[in-house]
Amino acid sequence: MAALSKTAPIGALILLAGAAQAEVTAEQVWQDWQEGARRLGETRIETGAEDRAGDTLTITDLVLTMQGEDGTLIARLPRIVFTETGDGTVEIGMSDSYPITITGTDEAGVESEIDLSVRQTGLALTVSGDPEAMRYDYTASRYALTLDEITEAGEVVPAEGLFALNALSGNYLAQTGTDGLRRTGYDIAAETLEIALEGEDDETGGTFSIDASVAEIAIDGALSLPEGMDEAEALPEGFSLAFDYATGPALVEFDGEGPQGRAAGTARTGSSEVSLALDPARASYASSTKGLTLTLTDGPLPFPLEASVAEYGFALDAPLAANEAAQDLSARVTLDSLTLSDPIWALFDPSAILPRDPATLILELSGTARLPQDLTDPETAEAVGEEAAMAEAAPEIESLTLDRLVLRLAGAEVLGDGTFSFDNSDFETFAGFPRPEGQIDLRITGLNGLIENLSRLGVIPAEQLMGPRMMLGLFTTPVGHDELTSTIEINAEGHVIANDQRIK
């Protein structure tokens, strides 16, 4: 099914409204709406009539057309009313519902059409501020986008869909400074988000349905764009983006049936957070989801399956701009307290040989790197695949610190930390890799017990146990009952030393 690659039908009209910069007159607000449409790309606005009566400007039969690479989006608004309140603000009223149609053609030449409806209940939109910085404040008891019909090659595709925000509120502020930068800030909150999808697969006869509800939605962000920014230009000077997203409890229920059988279940989370920051100098991303529980009530097995995680997430903070000096970087991976239900354990350990403790992986890294070229430079991207060019553009890691390592699995635990520096002038000592210098310290408990249990399970044949135990003796030092320590060092000469024994 073809879709517009550069349009977002859910928010197109809200963004258009927010893009305006208005003074206190209705005409100036309306004029800036039209200028906002032009900023969206290949977009045009047509109207049936524009009538002024007293303090009110009424636009009827508005048609917004947005042309994308893969198709066209058309929204038809029967009525928009701009009312001057007399206190320096303008109130905007819109039709309670209006249709959106998306058409396109896929690579095989198959034409498709998606018919949507926007239904907004209790929408209040007010413009305030001054001509240089206009603020839009809005509230709505409900803002919903429904899927009315999908057709492909003239045939109706059985499908239903709903996206709705309840108790919605927020604001939007846009201004262009004397430096030529257009700065936008927004803040959105909603009590709940509803998503419902249902459909059929004509080829297999399969069906699916998804129902989701998310509480306590909070989104805020800021965007800075240079005037006339070229889409092909990667992160020009002055560009910046910041985005934060958070939710409370969420529930997803799914059900599907096809040739392979039926699958049904639920996914629950306690809370989620995502943050993103991007500018020509740096990029950072962080996510965290807490209290995840997955339950498969119907599936390929005749009993329910369940898995839960206390927290999982990922984070990365890295430089993008070239600099002769080393720049900081960091990364984090979190999978805390993964728990599997007994039926899952029984699939590979029916005799309950392994301890069924929650599994955890926490890895936190930090370091420094020197960038000889901007990673956002189009020439750097073109270097991918060219060995010589990639060598010139590749970041040079100068130091790397293992700030924290926590690995717990089936009764064993590994804790570690350490630091290494790297000599980027020496790629011979460790062929193709800059020579490291430093050490890592590990503390390991329960590993011997895990090896014995794996042998009892048949994963490690009894006659092969000697090999793993010899390796442990080489790299570790016993300090207690099934408790080991290990120090792995690489010195200035490139020697690898484990517990004071040189192994390379």
Image: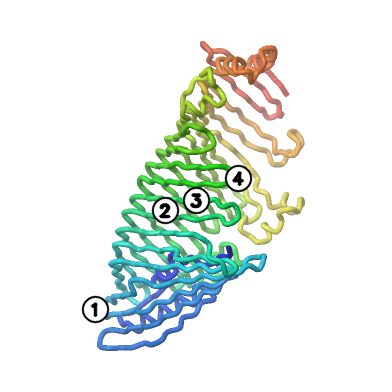
Q: Helix, strand or loop at disc 3? A: strand
Secondary structure state at the residue bearing disc 1: loop
User: Do residues under tags 1 and 3 come within 8 Å of each other at their CB atoms?
Assistant: no
- Closest to the camera, between mark 2 and mark 4, is 2
In front: label 1 or label 3:
3
Q: Please give the residue where the numbered disc 3 appears in the rendered image.
A: 208
Circle 2: element type: strand
Q: Quadrant of residue 125?
A: bottom left
Q: Nearer the viewer, residue 193 or 41?
A: 193
* Residue picked out by circle 4: 369
From the image, which quarter does the N terminus lie in?
A: bottom right
226 lies above or below 459: below
Drawn side of residue 314 relative to residue 95, left or right: right
Q: Residue at x 61, y 33 (%)?
A: 420
Q: Nearer the viewer, mark 4 or mark 3?
A: 3
Question: On the rendered structure, is 299 left or right of 59?
Answer: right
Q: Is residue 213 shown above or below 418?
A: below
Which residue shows up at 37% across the image and 49% down it? 247
Is 438 on the left-hand or right-hand side of 58? right
